[in-house]
Image (cartoon, rainbow, N blue to C red):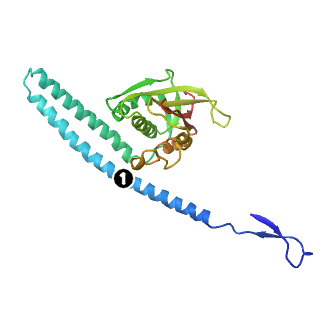
Amino acid sequence: MWVQALPPSYSDLPIQEVLLIEPAMPRAAQGRERDVLHGDLRRLAALGEMTAAAVHDFNNLLQVVVSALRVIEGQLDPVPAQEVKDLFAQGLSAAQRAAFLSRRLLSYGTASGGAAARLEIGAALRGSMPMLGWILGGRIGLRQALHEEPMVVECCANELEQVLLNLAANARDAMSGAGTLTLRSEIVPASSLSWPTRSVVAVSVVDDGCGMPEDVQARAFDRYFTTKGAEGSGIGLFAVREFARRNGGDAWLRSAPGQGTTVTVALPCRPLD
């Protein structure tokens, strides 16, 4: 910041420009915030490595369980009792499903982001439905209202699925374990000329949970803001918006107390060919 100052005893001398030194506190505060963020990132990276190792071992154990069940299947009586048949089928299905989920989690734990690529969003959303159902549990219904025509965006498929899982987990908590989640997609006009394309693909996760008051909505996308106390990290919705903006889009939400929440991730709609 520059100011003009006159010498106290030499008023006839030319006006001088004096540079005032900015206080160091803001920079120091920025440095502390940067150190905290780096520490958080290091802890998250370490947690990711530990989780990947645990999931890898868990997947190996599941393969043993599935293989053992296959051997048992070959040793059953030609016509087993219906009760035994049903129990065996349920056990094998559960083990196979757990192995599938562990492989998906392992791919997340070992992937470092990933490169953006052209993606047909409808196929990606439909492929995420089994994983979303697992996150939501048996008491929450899962519906899809997807745009029928192909829609192409550019992003990392793994990152998109992590965003959806993140939003599904938030919706599950907001519904206290019971309700309905709807996954919706549509093409809408770009909200301003600053968008790189005239139309955008809007993917929305809609829940019928408790909703948010206005003061919570205003801070929902802030880093480290959470209403879950010690159980929340405060980086979920922040990461969702960062994903959208990194890929040329944006994210927003609409909510009201007792009327549920809709979180929308919008990405530029790319040409089909």
Position of 89 relative to 38 (above/below): above
Residue 19 visible in image:
yes
Helix, strand or loop at mark 1:
helix
Determine the image quadrant of residue 64: top left
Q: Label 1 sits on what residue type?
A: Leu
Q: Tag 1: Cα neighbours inside 10 Å, few (<14), some, or many (≥20)?
A: few
Which residue lies most toward the left here?
Answer: 77
Residue occupying image coordinates x 33% and y 29%: 139
Q: Nearer the viewer, residue 103 or 145?
A: 145
Residue 162 image position (x, y, % from top left): 42, 40
Is 150 on the left-hand or right-hand side of 73? Answer: right
Residue 224 image position (x, y, % from top left): 48, 50
Question: Which quadrant does the C terminus fall into?
Answer: top right
Residue 131 image position (x, y, % from top left): 36, 33
Residue denoted by label 1: 47
Residue occupying image coordinates x 30% and y 36%: 100
Residue occupying image coordinates x 11% and y 32%: 72
Residue 4 image position (x, y, % from top left): 82, 67
